[in-house]
Image: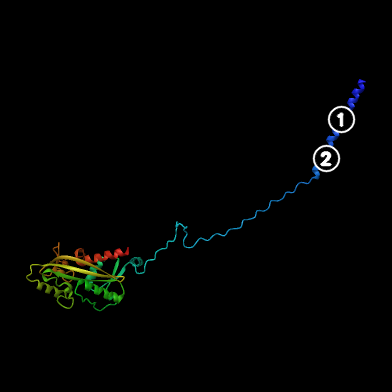
Amino acid sequence: MKTCIRLLCAVCCAAMLLTMTACSGGNTNTSSATAEATPAPEITPAPEATAAPEEEPTPAPEGNTSSETGENRHTSTLPVPETGSEESRASRRKIQASEKENMDIIFATNNAHKLTEVQAVLGPGYKLLTPRDCGVTEEIPEEQDTLEGNASQKAHYLHERTGMDCFADDTGLEVEALGGAPGVHSARYATDGHDFAANNRLLLKNLEGQANRRARFRTVISLLLDGEEHLFEGIVEGRIIDRETGHEGFGFDPLFIPDGYDRTFAQMTTGEKNEVSHRARAVRKLAAYLHSVEK
C-alpha cells in the first residue's frame, strides 16, 4: 500500500514538471512572435525651424543723433572764415609766403640809399620793389602838410595804380631853433627838387649865431596791406653841427650827430646807422607787424 502511494506521488510530480515545462516554452514563443509581428514605430522628423523674418534697420535720424533730453549731440560744423576777415587775410599771406621765398612789396621810393637801408632792416624775407619796377614812372605826389599826410598820400597813390601791397615813408628834420623847420618840407627845403647840398647850405645859413642846435629826425611809414592802412613812427634825437662831415648817407646826414655818438650819420656805415636811425626804427616796427600777421 505504501509502495502504491509513493508511486502515485512520483507520477504526479512528473506530470506537474511536464506541465510547467510546456507552459514555459509556450510563453517564450508567444513573446518572440509578438515581438516580430509588432513593427517598430516610425520616427517623425522634427519640423524645420522657421527663420524669423529679418527686421529692416531703422534709419538714424538725419542731422542730430541726440535723445529727447539733448544728450550726445553731434551737430558740429567747421566754421568758414569770412572772406574779408583778418584771419583769412593772414592765412592767404601765410600760404603766399610758403609758396615763394620772398614776399614782394612796393616801397614808394626810387632813392637807392633808402632802398639799401630799408632792405637791410627788413631782411631776406621781403623783396622790395620800386615804383619803376611796377611801371609807375611819374613822380608820386606828396602835397600834404604833415609827414603822416604825405606818407599816406604816396601809399594810396601807389596802391591805386598797382593794386599791390605797398608802403611809403616821409621823413623830416625838425630843428628846435627853427620852430620845427624844415620838417615836412625837408626834401625841398632849398629848391623844388632833391638838392641835398643846397638844403644843407640853407640849413647852416639859417642856424648862424644860434646856440641851440638841438634837432631830431622823424620818419612816418604808411603801410597799405590788403587795403588797410597802418602807420609806424621812428624818432632819433641829436644836434646839428656847423659844417658837413662824412661822405655816407644822404640828405642832412653830414650835419646830424645822434645823441650818444660823436660821429654824424654820414660817417657811419649803413649797419651802424641802422642801429639808431629814425628810419630804421620805423622800419623795425613795420617788419614786426608784417611778421605778426603772417603767423
**Closer to the camera in the image, 149 or 7:** 7
* Quarter assignment of residue 129: bottom left
Sooner in the amino-acid sequence: mark 1 or mark 2:
1
**In which quadrant is the N terminus drawn?**
top right
Residue 137 drawn at (x, y percent): 26, 78
Dot 1 falls on a residue whose secondary structure is helix
**Closer to the camera in the image, 83 or 72:** 72
Instruction: Farthest residue to the left: give it.
Output: 209
Disc 2 packing (10 Å; few <14; some 14–19; many ≥20): few
Residue 260 drawn at (x, y percent): 15, 61
Q: Is residue 32 above or below residue 266?
A: above
Label number found at residue 30: 2
Residue 159 drawn at (x, y percent): 29, 74
Label number found at residue 173: none
* Quarter assignment of residue 284: bottom left
Q: Is residue 280 left or right of residue 73?
A: left
Q: Is residue 197 above or below residue 62?
A: below
Q: Is residue 54 left or right of residue 168?
A: right
Label number found at residue 16: 1
Q: CA distance from mark 1 to mark 2?
A: 21 Å
Residue drawn at 22 percent across, 69 percent down:
220
What amino acid is at disc 2? Thr
What amino acid is at disc 1? Met
Dot 2 falls on a residue whose secondary structure is helix
Name the colouring of the figure: rainbow
Q: Is residue 134 visible?
A: no
Disc 1 packing (10 Å; few <14; some 14–19; many ≥20): few
Instruction: Farthest residue to the top: give it.
Output: 2
Label pair 1/2, CB-CB below 8 angstroms: no
* Quarter assignment of residue 191: bottom left
